DNA sequence: TGTACATCAGTGAACGCGCGTTCACTGATGTAC
DNA sequence: TGTACATCAGTGAACGCGCGTTCACTGATGTAC
């Protein structure tokens, strides 16, 4: 019998990844140190570098993993015939707002990602494309191009609203933001944006 | 004649504030150190504490100032009778995307603010209320409550889209996000969200 | 008018601390001959 | 079968560095008497 089970190394790596993923989403990438992650994972500092080349390498791996999991959720919803409305209401819920550690990595980290090196942004960009494509497939109607346009608008609204609802320090305003964003996202998903213009009445 | 001009102290404080404001928006709060700010401002480390009580105090002052400036811009647009469309197109432009240092502090820092102490979040919340109220006043039609609802949705879409456009590493996708968000924000401002539901056809 | 002290805006070195990263080492197991 | 070496997953102390913050000091000016 081996000192470590077969696959032990993979399990450890997975564990570090999960701990880092939670902590990054909870507190931000710059605010979290490797020592804290390794301690939470039940390991010592030095072991980190037998699994990852650098902190940036970990960040990239965390993003790829966390975004892939979210993409998988979209795939499941699609396969189960779940309406986009469920996805939207789930995303813009007080539960998601209050549990950033297990929530959407984009809402938690998007502004930090914009300041990270090319490789990290490449990883983010690729997975974001996947998520947009999956949301597009969930749109109730419209051409492929039209569905994609809607998916982008809906996603932007969701990400922006969740972040605002987390930052404001007023329970009522926070819930007001979530509720209004649900309505807005549903309307956008339904295709309300085409041809609409401020100041120009919508023709009947 | 005094060693320092009258108001010299205020000028210095303003200068530190401006430097910090730019650097925070460009690189994030956690990633920027006081030494760097003071060096850029042409002063030494120690002088910082004759103007601010702590880094957190500076963060709060920067937010209050930068958000007040944005609110003022909304006020000016309103006073000059500028259409909301101009505000939206300006916000969701490649220029704003590429110049975060002088851009919207909310888009640059909202997820970090969510993790800061109460006093900082209070400051953010108050100014965000002001901005929402000013955007509501810019809405083309609708009751006060209706305008406010639209303002919240439009703002969330703007903030989310600008951040996504900054994070993705693909010029085409970035511009696609901005352009679609402009359409979506205009439609939402025009009041498309009321009564719309996915899967339920809009009644004529 | 002279002088002693106060004030102002800042200097610049130092504090303790935690960061990302490196590295010599450990100890259980596997492998070669 | 015995033994010498390799491998694996990890330990834990140390590296240099930059962080936020403190503090004794400076030097020009203002004020009291």
Image: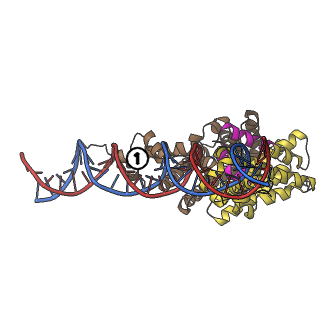
Chain colours: A yellow, B brown, C red, D blue
Which residue lies most toward the bottom here?
A171
Whether residue A131 is visible, yes or no, is: yes
Q: Nearer the viewer, residue C11 or B1?
A: C11
Residue B156 in the magenta stretch? The answer is no
Q: Quadrant of residue B130?
A: bottom right
Residue at image point 89% right, 56% down: A83
Which of the 4 image quarters holds residue B167?
Answer: top right
Residue in the picture at 41% in, 47% down: B13
Q: Residue furthest top?
A: B171
Q: Is residue A113 within the magenta segment?
A: yes
Whole-percent x, y for residue A151 in the image: 82, 46
Q: Quadrant of the N terminus of chain A?
A: bottom right
Location of residue A176 in the rendering, given as x and y in whole percent from the top left corner: 71, 62
The image position of residue B192, as x and y in percent, is 80, 51
Location of residue A146 (image quadrant): top right
User: Which of the two residues, B158 or C9, is positioned nearer the viewer here?
Assistant: C9
* Residue identifier under label 1: B45
Mark 1, other Cα within 10 Å: few <14 / some 14–19 / many ≥20: few
Q: Which element type, helix, strand or loop, lies under badge 1?
A: helix
Q: What span is in magenta? A: A103-129
> Of helix, strand and loop, which mostly describes the magenta segment?
helix
Dot 1: chain letter: B
Q: Is residue A200 visible?
A: no
Horizontal and vertical percent position of residue B50: 37, 52
Q: Measuring 69% from the left and 39% from the top, which residue is drawn there?
A: B89
> Across the whole image, how many numbered discs are drawn on residues?
1
Relative to the observer, which residue lies in front, B55 or B159? B55
């Amino acid at each position: 019998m081996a000192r470590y089970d077969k696959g032990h190394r993979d399990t450890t790596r997975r564990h570090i990844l999960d701990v880092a993923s939670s902590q990054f989403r909870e507190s931000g990438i710059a605010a979290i140190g490797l020592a804290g992650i390794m301690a939470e994972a039940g390991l010592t500092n030095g072991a980190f570098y037998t699994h990852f080349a650098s902190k940036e390498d970990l960040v990239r791996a965390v993003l790829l993993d966390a975004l892939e999991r979210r993409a998988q959720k979209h795939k499941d919803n699609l396969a189960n015939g779940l309406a986009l409305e469920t996805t939207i209401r789930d995303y813009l819920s007080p539960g998601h707002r209050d549990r950033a550690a297990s929530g959407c990595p984009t809402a938690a980290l998007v502004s930090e990602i914009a300041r990270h090196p090319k490789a990290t942004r490449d990883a983010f960009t690729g997975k974001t494309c996947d998520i947009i494509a999956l949301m597009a497939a969930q749109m109730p109607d419209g051409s492929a191009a039209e569905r994609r346009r809607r998916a982008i608008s809906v996603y932007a609204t969701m990400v922006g609203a969740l972040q605002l609802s987390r930052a404001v320090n007023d329970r009522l305003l926070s819930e007001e933001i979530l509720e209004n964003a649900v309505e807005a996202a549903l309307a956008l998903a339904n295709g309300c944006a085409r041809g609409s213009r401020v100041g120009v009445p919508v023709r009947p």
